[in-house]
Structure formats: structure tokens, C-alpha cells
Image (cartoon, helix red, strand yellow):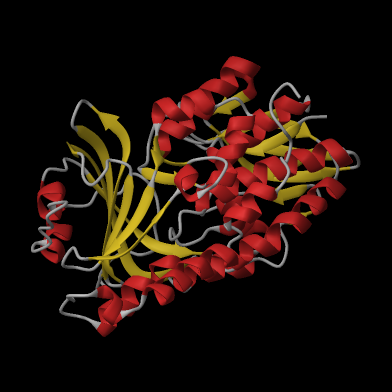
Amino acid sequence: MTVLICGAGISGLTLGLSLHQIGVPFRIIEAIAELRPLGFGINLQPHAVRELYDLGLEAGLDAAGIPTAEIAYFNAKGQKIWDEPRGIAAGYAWPQYSIHRGALQMLLHNTLLKRCGPKAILGGAKVSEWYETPHGIEVVLTDHAVGAELGRERGSVLVACDGVQSTIRSTIFPEQGQANLRRSMMWRGLVRGKRFLDGRTMTISGAKGAKFVAYPVADSGKEGSLINWIADIDKPMDRDFTRQDWSRRGKVSDVLPTFADWHFDWLDIPELIASTEAVWEYPMLDRDPLPRWTDGRIALMGDSAHAMYPIGSNGASQGILDARVLARELRDHGETPEALVAYEEVRRDPVNEIILANRQQGPDVVLDAVAELAPDGFDDIDAVLPEAERRELAERYKQATGLGVEEINAKPAILGPVGH
């Protein structure tokens, strides 16, 4: 029978491509009638990149994204606190990529349609109800725009990839209620600008309460980059913290005053913000770790299973790994509840640990430590926080989230390359 996938985001599309790789029938049900490249920058960690390479997407990633060479942390005066290599430069066998989320989604989407045909995705439909049958599951589909019933689909299992506001998750776990809100707002922008540093570096500046992230997600001409930026600012209680989507407009004036004096010799942040045409906002939120990700013939995946604070560049990567592991278990156990449980047993506990680690600020905690010790800046960072302590903070997060170089490089492939 067919595996039904609710949601054509990164994890849902990766699952579809993975099931096609192993010959398992599937159909993706997507609420949006026609996908467009929405969103902003994300980072893909090396273990997730490996899985996309195994799906034959190496050339597409190279064309669409930036192989990240370094991450660097700065205080609010632009003074460097810590830097370290990323991807191949750090010793991983695969690169890390900074990429526009929409570009990645469309790469996955277009590849899937090319390999599987247009009927692989049913657009404009949402799963409104579902019923287990003696041998599978039946879902009721409704028109996303008007709510009229569109019919029913039958399959062996249903995989919920419908995001942080997952209807399926909230139905299975009604006691979970609203997402957890950190009472800070994130503003995002994309702007074409001059390359800064080496044109391959992800930068994080400031500290909790006023933090600015900037990194290139694509090259743009001889001297330029398409730069993704994120402003994370504590805001008063008059903000609406209950929504998260990609269509919530913000204003440059909401962001610029906080960073008005952040003129660094390597990047003029006020100029970058002011030159951005469209700014979008959404609250910083996550959801509590779940005690289970499965319910009979239903499994949760990606943000539906483990919405986490966007710290440490782990959200999209974990959704990709979910998809590959679930495909493997469906291959090994058949399209059964047993396969879903086997997937959960591999993935749930490690990813729940990442949710908790991100609540502690992840590797960004080094910014807070230096801001407390040297609020007015420093002449010698080693006199403020010795290198060994800064390194220990970075390594602590890697170990907690399974990102150690040796650990990643030593792991066998989840499914292996397409065609093998």
C-alpha cells in the first residue's frame, strides 16, 4: 500500500525521495496549491548533507547554496570572541551548507516531480480527519482554501510533516496546547550586499536580548552575496507571540534602533538592515519533547515531532535525518506500525536532547558569558574568557547534539546512495 505524507516541506519531500529510492509507493498531501520558494536562510549540517548527497543532490546544493567555511562569534562592538571551521574545513567528510530554505525546498520538490511525476504531490488539500482500518489508514481531505471535502485517500501509514503548528500532533496530544514562547521576537531579512569576511562565514553577534546573525546563502555577482540576517530582540508583552508563519510582515523600524550603533569594520549592520526591502517577523518558540512520536499507523516527523529554537543550525538537518531513518525502517519492517516504532526508537531521544540543549542557548552561550564578564568590550579576549573555556562551550554542544567530527564521519550511511 501507499505511505501517505502530510506536508511537502523539507522533511516530507526528503521522505518522498527516499521512499522512491527504495521502491515504496507514497503520496504527499500538501495544503498549499502551488509551492513557491518562501522562507529565509538555514544551515545544513554535514550528516544531513551526506543524506542529500546520497539522494543525488550534490550538484543542486552546490548551485543553490554556500559551503560554509567558518562560524564566528562577536560582541556588540564587533570584537571577535570565538571562531572555528565548519564542514570540510573542520574535518567532516561532507560540507555544511548555508542555503535559502525556499531554494532547498524547490530543489527537493522539482527533483521529486522529475523522478516520480506530478501525481506524487496532491496540492491544495489538507488532512482533516483519519481513521485506522484493519489493514491501513484512511484520511479525509478538504480543500485548504474553502474547506470543502475533496475525497479520501487510503494508505498503509500516515506520516505527519505538517510543521510546528501540526494539526495531527495537536489531535494526538491535545494536552500540549500552545507552543512555548521565549518572549523574544525574531526578524528576518534577505538582501544583496557586499561580501564580508571570506564570503563563507556565518556570524553571530551580541548576546541574548539583542543578537544579530548574518551569513551568505548564495553568491551574487563578482563582489556580492545574498545575505540572510536574523535579529533576535527581547520585546515587551504587547507583541503577538502566538503565530509563526512566513507571511508576517515586520518593519525595518522595528529592528534598526536596537542595532543603530553596530558599525563593525567587517560589516555595517545598520546599513544592511536599512537596505533590506522586506522584513518578516515571528516569535522564538519551541515545543516540549514528546514521550512518543507514533500513534498506531501515524508517525510524526520534522517540526511536527520536534520543533526547536533555531539555535545551533539543527532544525532542518534533523528533519532530513528523520526521513532517511523512517525510510530505512519501512524498507526493513514493511509499511507497518512496527516500522514507525522502530523509527521512533532511533530518533526520539537524541532529538529531544537537542530541544533541551537549544533551550540553554546552545553554542551561543559564549556570547552571554563574555557580555557578562566584559560588557564594555575587551582588549584581550583571552583575559576575559580563556580559549580553553570558549572551546569547551563549543564542544559541549557538539557532543550533546551528536555533531562531533569523529562521530559523524564514522557512522555508516542510513540508506546509501541512489542506485545502490
Which residue is depicted at the point 57% across and 69% down? 288
Compared across the picture, whether 159 is left or right of 62 comes to: right
In the image, is residue 365 above or below residue 320? below
Residue 142 in view in this figure: no
Question: Residue 119: x percent and y percent?
Answer: 63, 19
Which residue is depicted at the point 35% across and 77% down? 386
In the image, is residue 52 above or below residue 270? above
Indicate the quadrant where residue 281 lies: bottom left
Q: What quarter of the picture does the N terminus occupy?
A: top right
Which residue is depicted at the point 48% across and 25% down? 60
Q: Nearer the viewer, residue 189 or 288?
A: 189
Question: Residue 416: x percent and y percent?
Answer: 72, 33
Q: Nearer the viewer, residue 185 or 323?
A: 323
Question: Residue 250: x percent and y percent?
Answer: 22, 52
Residue 407 in view in this figure: yes
Which residue is depicted at the point 77% across and 45% down? 131
Question: Residue 384: x percent and y percent?
Answer: 28, 81
In the image, is residue 155 above or below residue 209? above
Compared across the picture, whether 99 is left or right of 398 comes to: left
In the image, is residue 107 above or below residue 235? above
